[in-house]
Image (spheres, rainbow, N blue to C red):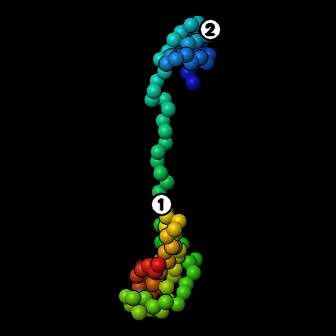
Amino acid sequence: MEFCPKCKVLMLPKGDIFICNTCGAKKKKSGSSVVVEKQKKKETVVLEKRIDILPKTRIECPKCGNNEAFWILRQTRASDEPETKIFTCTKCDHRWRQY
Ligand SMILES: [Zn+2]
Ligand SMILES: [Zn+2]
């Protein structure tokens, strides 16, 4: 959308220019006016933020031998792949995964 600098009315697009219907002023379309936002949302680390509401399960930590760990399901992008269970030891924070 372009407005005539003289009459402040909306100019009509015609080819690669804008034309003012009131005074006949012409203005080139600026290609940079359309800015596409490409910023991706930052991936939030679910494991760290929700550690206190994660379900626990009885499983032996391979690192410290503790018998309890939080677990979370991480879905892989490919639908034919099984979900990955990621465990976090409640004692030493060691993380490991199970397929
Ligand atoms: Zn005008
Ligand atoms: Zn552990």
Horizontal and vertical percent for residue 73? 53, 74
Horizontal and vertical percent for residue 19? 56, 13
Question: Which residue bears the numbered disc 1?
Answer: 43
Residue at 49% from the left image edge and 89% from the top image edge: 59
In three-dimensional space, the C-alpha distance between marks 1 and 2, rounded to whole angstroms, equals: 51 Å
Question: Which residue bears the numbered disc 2?
Answer: 22
Horizontal and vertical percent for residue 13? 56, 18
Residue furthest to the front in view is 80
Observer-nearest residue: 16 or 33? Answer: 16
Which amino acid type is marked by label 1? Glu
Q: Quadrant of the N terminus?
A: top right
Residue at 51% from the left image edge and 82% from the top image edge: 70
- Residue 23 placement: quadrant: top right
Residue at 49% from the left image edge and 67% from the top image edge: 76
Observer-nearest residue: 82 or 72? Answer: 82
Residue 51 visible somewhere in the drawing: no
Report crowding for label 2: few under 14, some 14 to 19, many 20 or more residues within 10 A (C-alpha): few
Which amino acid type is marked by label 2? Thr
